[in-house]
Image (cartoon, rainbow, N blue to C red):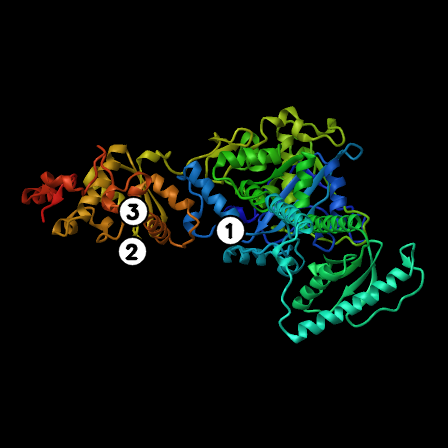
Amino acid sequence: MQGRLRLRRLLTLRAPPPPVIILPYRGLSSSPPASGGGSGGDGDGGGSVAVKQVTRGNLAESLEELRVRVREAAFVGIDLEMSGVTSAPWRDTFELDRADVRYLKLRDSAQRFAALQLGVCPFRWDPAKSAFVAHPHNFFIFPRKELSSDSLSHEFLCQTTSIDFLAKYQFDFNTCFREGISYLSRAQEEEALQKLNLLYHDQSASSSTPSQEDADMPLKSAADILFTERMKMKFNEWRDVIISKPIVHNHLSENINYNTGQFQTVFFKMRPAIMLNGFSSHQLKLIQQVLRKHFRDLVYICTFGEDDISEKRVVYSDTTEDQMLLMKDVHEDLLRSREARVKSAIGIRHVIDLLSSERKLIVGHSCFLDIAQVYSKFIGPLPSSMKEFALGIHKIFPHIADTRHLMSVSLAVQNLMRQKSKSLSSVFSLLCPASYTSPEKSSILRPVRIEVEGDETTSSRFISGAKHEAGYDAYMTGCVFAQLCSYLDIKFENLPPQENLATNNKLQKHINFLPPSFNSGTVVDLSTGMERPDPGYMRRYPAAVYDNIVLIWGFQSKVRPKDIKDCISKVFGSASVTLVFSIDSTAVLVQFSDQESVNDFLDLKAALERTDSAIALLHPLSSILEGGQTRAAKYDTYRDICSSSESKYLFADQAEAVCSLLKDQLRINVDDNVISGAHEGILEPASVKKGDGTKCGSKNQDNNDISCQDILDALQNGRALVGKGIRS
């Protein structure tokens, strides 16, 4: 999937002979067979594996076939292709990100970008062949508006690098946008059904209780008077004909030719009726008024046909009890038809519901963002915290395995992958290449055999799979997983048919652990929602101490982290700063060696920004101040900025947009000097609390005004201005 773009290198990896056998494709359809195997390395080529292409035209039949395949499967590989990964460089996940910040970034990605393809590949163990049989499916997705009651159209972002990447691998955008399958999430379905039920009860109540709209309209024009009289005459004529001819088996005993341009005699629910064609809304209201005043046995009925096109009828019903039964039937039919329309709009989510109901082991590669996309698009709005999300997805998919995590639990695989890319295509080319020589030359492990199989449906569409197509990537993920199981000493020969691998004792302790990102250094336990360190992760930066981190933003020109560290070290000492990390060209995170230095730095910066003297220009921190353009705050402010729905490309612009929004919310009757809590560091640089709880720049600090001696001391010692104020 695209979430691993930065991990994929265009290199050709020459791996040792593999322990996996991928047998040639043995399709049962009319499509020509393709020889099996994956591509070598990370080149542009794809594997010759037949992948079933599913669009809205063949979804129903494909879903029935997939249901059988999933039910028989030992596990199911999945993958997603998306329209983008990050909306701005600073929204990328960093090693220094705290768990809550990292989740906010991943949530932002899942919410903003579209899922364009869903790959699903069930793997069934065939004891007779001693091989897995794979059935890769590639579902095209496009979120179009399916319900007329849904007033909002879908919107999503496209990241140009992601779209270019997909185009490079021949992604079929025409099929995606024209034939892609739409969907309703579970939350959207529930909301639509609630609206229908509310509408049904309202209509049922209104049918038995006259409303204000039923009140007679005064006939003010001659045209209205003539129209109502003409309608009265026509309805009288028609009713007299109906009464005079007995009804037998839902038909009049004699043919009645009472059809005109606007009147057409039909039967509706075994009752004689007139179809009303070509009348204006005003005329229809006059017709209803005529029926209420002059015809107790004629009922006006409005139903909806295809595409919610309304159909108006006048139905003959000679008793009050029959009329009540008729209206009840009409309302129930309307409810059922709209419920059916909601169900049909579920679309691709049927696949997700199938995987959830079968409770099979779901396998992905670096799949946290894939799973977040699945939740966002097909379940409902993503929760606000990592724990809520983990526990929520665990209820839907109780068994998830991430091949990226499984690679880290086997020393043999770690040694094999040393100094190699851990992208899916690289791992696949290393563990599952197309050719196989002999077990003696390749590995001491017994090889895992895999076949790809089609079906007998003549309308099925199979094409040769290619890398970075979701269906083929799901197939590659399953192949990698099968081999990793071998390294965990799982013997497939003893696996009963339709056995769910999630119950395997040797595998259970390694499932439901997902790395949130490739550089998180942690795994999330979906069963508890807790995050724990990944012992196999090699850190690039020192471990973060978030209470010791300061966020600085607003740089007008790019400043090197080394220059910022040198600048601060001149004031606070060479050991005061342990790390300076660039968020983007406008912002950095600075980690101090202790929390006291954090407070001192914020106090000193605030004091320098309040003075217009030469001190601010000559002080060692002047390159950070940039004439008062930069701002600084503690790490929680970084979290607040990342949680905002604002979307700016540069971090400084994002921060200022969030600041402006907060100031607008707090502006009424709020004195800047009493703004407290989490917003203090974000609103004004001079409003940062000191370590002792007092605030720099407050009116009670006259006794700490800066003197001439203070100026001389400041030039010798950069920290001398802490707690001082300028005399006016």
The type of residue carrying mark 3 is Leu
Q: Nearer the viewer, residue 491 or 170?
A: 170
Q: Please give the name of the residue rendered at 38% of the width and 46% of the height, measured from the top-left corner.
A: 641
Q: How would you rate the neighbour count of disc 2 (Cα within 10 Å): few for under 14, some for 14-19, many for 20 or more?
A: few
Q: Are marks 1 and 3 in contact (CB under 8 Å)?
A: no
Q: Are marks 1 and 2 in contact (CB under 8 Å)?
A: no
**Is 154 drawn above or below residue 404 in the view shown?**
below
Q: Please give the name of the residue rendered at 82% of the width and 54% of the height, measured from the top-left corner.
A: 318
Residue mark closest to the camera, 1 vs 3:
3
Given the current orientation, which residue lies at the most extreme left position? 708
Q: Earlier in the sequence, mark 3 or mark 2?
A: 2
33 left or right of 389?
right
The type of residue carrying mark 2 is Gln
Q: How would you rate the neighbour count of disc 1 (Cα within 10 Å): few for under 14, some for 14-19, many for 20 or more?
A: many
Residue topped by disc 2: 556
Dot 1 falls on a residue whose secondary structure is helix
Residue 31 picture location, percent across and down: 78, 54
Q: Which mark is residue 683?
A: 3
Dot 3 falls on a residue whose secondary structure is helix
Q: CA distance from mark 3 to mark 2?
A: 19 Å
Q: CA distance from mark 1 to mark 2?
A: 28 Å
Residue mark closest to the camera, 1 vs 2:
1
The type of residue carrying mark 1 is Arg
Q: Which mark is residue 112?
A: 1
Residue mark closest to the camera, 3 vs 2:
3
Residue 381 picture location, percent across and down: 54, 44
